[in-house]
């Protein structure tokens, strides 16, 4: 006989089913917490396993040999680094057998890396600065080496133009920003550049090679001025191009003010100047820009207006030639331009030239101190197209 089951009072009621469902829902957060702890344990276990695997538990001879070999290699590399800084005081003595002796030595002679690196860097920089100074001194010595001047009895004007593609040209047209468009042959369409390789060679002696740095040293705290017509202006521009190649950017300026153009070299307190006066004396062609006048008139005895700009210059280089070549006779003004005179007389060109040169020579004798100022005069020169 089967004993009938005992039914609980809650088993068949809706309220009992709702209570049990609520209990199951309450157990869900507990399950999430337990599962999270389980994952965290696995993660920690894996990290521990990794650390344990790297720790040398084994004390077998083979493992010990591998460990000693690794320590020997590390000690050897540190020894090489120590040799490279052997000149540093209190350097660290390294042992090639074990790292223990290295640590003991560092405790006995505490030289930190923070102390070593600045000393080593300073030493290297000082050595580099010394090497750079030596190179600069060598370059300056090369630039400032003694130049052998030709003997005084050598006739510099007796010679020939020789073709020299090795040392000439001394500067290239596109490397000098101060050349005017009038004298830039290559820019104006000239095809060949061989004309730049010609050099003057005296027959009985040699001219020294041009040295720009030596020129600047000679010009230190001084003024060099070219005075005259466009041929002397060409010489002035060439002199600027010769000198500017050794002047740093920003340390050179060119200022034009009327008839006077001044090229200044800041580091040497020097100037290379040009003053426009095609006849040296006053004329109706004294405007530096508007001077292309066919009917040229001069005042042979009037030079003070120009001359006041030449006083105090250390080196004066005069010329007047090309502007005398357009007519057979020269027109001499009666009176002065300031008084509005317009009438003139015509005289032979050689006579007019003599009058102008006499006026110029008297001005030099009266206003130039030969102990301070050196005067040069350039006579006939090739034309621009030659």
Image (tube, rainbow, N blue to C red):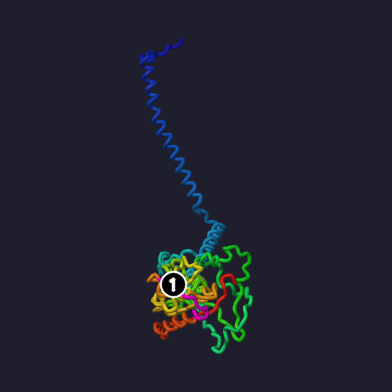
Q: Which residues are magenta?
A: 341-353
Q: Is residue 46 visible?
A: yes
Residue appearing at x 60%, y 72% in the figure: 386
Residue 352 magenta-drawn? yes
Q: Which residue is mark 1?
A: 343
Residue appearing at x 46%, y 40% in the figure: 42
Q: Quadrant of residue 307?
A: bottom left
Tag count:
1
In the image, is 174 to the left or to the right of 22?
right
Q: Is residue 260 above or below residue 14?
A: below
Q: Position of residue 188 (x, y in %)?
A: 57, 63
The one of 262 and 72 positioned closer to us in this rendering: 262
Residue 198 magenta-drawn? no
The one of 227 and 149 positioned closer to us in this rendering: 227
Q: Position of residue 207 (x, y in %)?
A: 57, 82
Q: Secondary structure at mark 1?
A: loop
Which residue ends up furthest to the bottom in the rendered image? Answer: 153
Which residue ends up furthest to the top in the rendered image? Answer: 1
Q: Is residue 91 visible?
A: no
The one of 10 and 297 positioned closer to us in this rendering: 297
Q: Position of residue 39 (x, y in %)?
A: 45, 38
Give the crowd class for mark 1: few <14, some 14-19, many >=20 residues within 10 Å: few
Q: Position of residue 159 (x, y in %)?
A: 61, 82
Residue appearing at x 37%, y 71% in the figure: 339
């Amino acid at each position: 006989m089967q004993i009938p089951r005992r039914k609980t009072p809650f088993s068949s009621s809706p309220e009992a089913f709702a209570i049990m469902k609520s209990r199951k829902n309450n157990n869900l957060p507990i399950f999430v917490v337990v599962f999270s702890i389980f994952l965290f344990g696995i993660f920690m276990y894996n990290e521990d396993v990794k650390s344990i695997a790297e720790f040398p538990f084994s004390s077998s001879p083979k493992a010990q040999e591998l460990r000693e070999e690794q320590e020997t290699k590390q000690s050897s590399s540190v020894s090489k680094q120590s040799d490279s800084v052997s000149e540093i005081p209190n350097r660290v003595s390294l042992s090639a057998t074990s790292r223990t002796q290295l640590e003991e030595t560092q405790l006995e002679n505490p030289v930190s890396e923070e102390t070593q690196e600045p000393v080593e860097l300073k030493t290297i920089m000082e050595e580099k600065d010394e090497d750079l100074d030596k190179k600069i001194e060598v370059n300056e010595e090369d630039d400032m080496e003694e130049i052998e001047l030709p003997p005084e009895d050598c006739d510099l004007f007796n010679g020939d133009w020789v073709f020299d593609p090795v040392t000439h040209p001394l500067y290239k047209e596109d490397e000098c920003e101060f050349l005017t468009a009038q004298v830039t042959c290559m820019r104006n369409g000239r095809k060949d550049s061989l004309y730049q390789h010609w050099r003057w060679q005296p027959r009985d002696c040699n001219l020294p090679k041009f040295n720009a740095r030596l020129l600047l040293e000679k010009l230190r705290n001084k003024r060099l001025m070219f005075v005259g017509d466009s041929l002397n202006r060409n010489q002035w521009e060439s002199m600027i191009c010769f000198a500017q190649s050794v002047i740093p950017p920003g340390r050179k300026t060119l200022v034009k003010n009327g008839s006077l153009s001044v090229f200044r070299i800041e580091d040497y307190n020097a100037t290379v100047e040009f003053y426009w006066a095609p006849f040296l004396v006053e004329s109706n062609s004294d405007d530096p820009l508007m001077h292309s006048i066919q009917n040229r008139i001069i005042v042979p005895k009037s030079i003070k207006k120009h001359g006041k700009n030449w006083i105090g210059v250390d080196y004066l280089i005069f010329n007047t030639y090309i502007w005398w070549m357009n007519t057979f006779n020269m027109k001499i003004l009666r009176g002065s331009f300031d008084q509005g005179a317009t009438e003139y007389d015509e005289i032979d060109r050689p006579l007019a030239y003599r009058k102008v040169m006499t006026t110029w020579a008297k001005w030099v004798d009266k206003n130039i101190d030969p102990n301070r100022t050196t005067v040069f005069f350039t006579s006939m020169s090739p034309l621009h197209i030659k």
